[in-house]
């Protein structure tokens, strides 16, 4: 199965789970009168929207390089991941505002009704389903080195955490009496704040990739070690790195004995390229500029 088809399959499994949860959560939230559960349903709805985004953008990112995209279309996957984070941030904002309005009503003395048990059962079911989807998507995303799948996995995990907060708030509002019905909207606000943190972390990573941020220092050091391991090669310098979706690009200068033939120099550069691709993937873009060793 190709990488693109496997991403589709994993995303489809998640989208089916999201659709079922969205319907059940909205029904449970409305019938049980729970703002925390309705907020949780909105979050699941945002999950479904991002599943659609993943399917659309991954099909674009899988296209090979062409005249207009010399490095391929991998950035479209990063762009999709960025959009997923924005949707998550928007959903978090809506949840916080909605819960905040109910907290303000409670502060002004307006009584809040305790939610029904149906909302609690919906929250518990959501925790189980979304945690399973997180584990499944995260494992596949890491194996396929797909940033958008990993972002989508965290969307599943954040929904599970959202449901944990909702379950605590709903359960407290049900079992602790009318004085504690405020726990339901309070839980929705806490859930929203957690989602803001998740969205921020995802945006930070994706903005770094879209603005050509270099690979981590430890990765660049590993690249230098691989280059220096080739006999006759010294002083790797002007190293430049970046990520292109699930691929990376490496541009570096090396020094070789100026008296060796062009053919031998080419063989050494090719050997380095093969070593780097063996470590970071066959789709790695490698550019090596060769210079003679400086004479003392």
Image: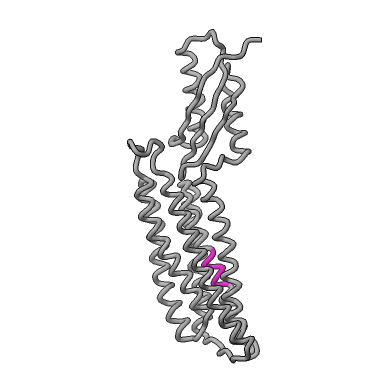
Q: Is residue 40 left or right of residue 107?
A: left
- Is residue 160 inside the magenta stretch? yes
Residue at 54% from the left image edge and 86% from the top image edge: 115
Q: Nearer the viewer, residue 184 or 208?
A: 208
- Is residue 215 inside the magenta stretch? no
Measured from the top left, where is residue 181 in percent x and y?
60, 86
Q: Quadrant of residue 21?
A: bottom left
Q: Determine whether 7 is above or below 232 in the image.
A: below
Magenta segment, which residues? 158-164
Measured from the top left, where is residue 38 in percent x and y?
48, 78
Q: Is the image coloured rainbow, by chain, by secondary structure, or in one colour?
A: one colour
Q: Determine whether 232 is above or below 211 in the image.
A: above
Measured from the top left, where is residue 290 in percent x and y?
52, 19
Q: Determine whether 225 is above or below 75 in the image.
A: above
Residue at 47% from the left image edge and 74% from the top image edge: 41
**Majority secondary structure in the magenta region:** helix
Number of labels in the image equals 0
Q: Quadrant of the C terminus?
A: top right
Residue at 54% from the left image edge and 8% from the top image edge: 259
Q: Nearer the viewer, residue 55 or 167?
A: 55
> Quick one: which residue is furthest to the top in this view?
259
Q: Is residue 171 visible?
A: no
Residue at 48% from the left image edge and 13% from the top image edge: 264
Measured from the top left, where is residue 99 in percent x and y?
56, 78
> Quick one: which residue is furthest to the left in this view?
67
Q: Is residue 242 visible?
A: yes
Q: Quadrant of residue 72?
A: top left
Q: Is residue 77 left or right of residue 259?
A: left
Q: Nearer the viewer, residue 132 or 268?
A: 268
Q: Quadrant of residue 190?
A: bottom right
């Amino acid at each position: 199965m190709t990488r693109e088809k496997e991403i589709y399959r994993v995303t489809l499994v998640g989208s089916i789970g999201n659709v079922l949860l969205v319907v059940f959560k909205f029904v449970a939230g409305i019938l049980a009168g729970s703002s925390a559960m309705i907020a949780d349903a909105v979050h699941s709805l945002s999950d479904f929207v991002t599943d659609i985004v993943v399917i659309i953008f991954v099909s674009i990112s899988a296209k090979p390089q062409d005249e207009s995209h010399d490095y391929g279309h991998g950035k479209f996957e990063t762009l999709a991941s960025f959009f997923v984070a924005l949707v998550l941030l928007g959903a978090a904002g809506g949840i916080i505002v909605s819960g905040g309005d109910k907290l303000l009503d409670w502060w002004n003395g307006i009584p809040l009704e305790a939610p029904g048990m149906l909302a609690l059962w919906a929250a518990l079911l959501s925790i189980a389903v979304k945690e399973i989807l997180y584990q499944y998507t995260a494992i596949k995303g890491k194996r396929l080195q797909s940033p958008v799948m990993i972002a989508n996995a965290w969307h599943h995990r954040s929904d599970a955490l959202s449901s944990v907060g909702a379950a605590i708030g709903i359960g407290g509002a049900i079992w602790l009496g009318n004085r504690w019905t405020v726990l339901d909207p309070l839980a929705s606000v806490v859930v929203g704040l957690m989602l803001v943190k998740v969205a921020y972390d995802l945006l930070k990573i994706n903005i770094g990739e879209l603005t050509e941020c270099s690979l981590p220092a430890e990765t660049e050091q590993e690249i230098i070690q691989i280059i220096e391991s080739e006999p006759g090669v010294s002083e790797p310098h002007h190293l430049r790195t970046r990520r292109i979706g699930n691929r990376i690009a490496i541009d570096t200068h090396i020094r070789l004995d100026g008296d060796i033939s062009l053919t031998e120099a080419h063989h050494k550069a090719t050997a380095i390229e093969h070593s780097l691709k063996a470590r970071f993937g066959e789709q790695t873009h490698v550019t090596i500029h060769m210079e003679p060793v400086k004479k003392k």
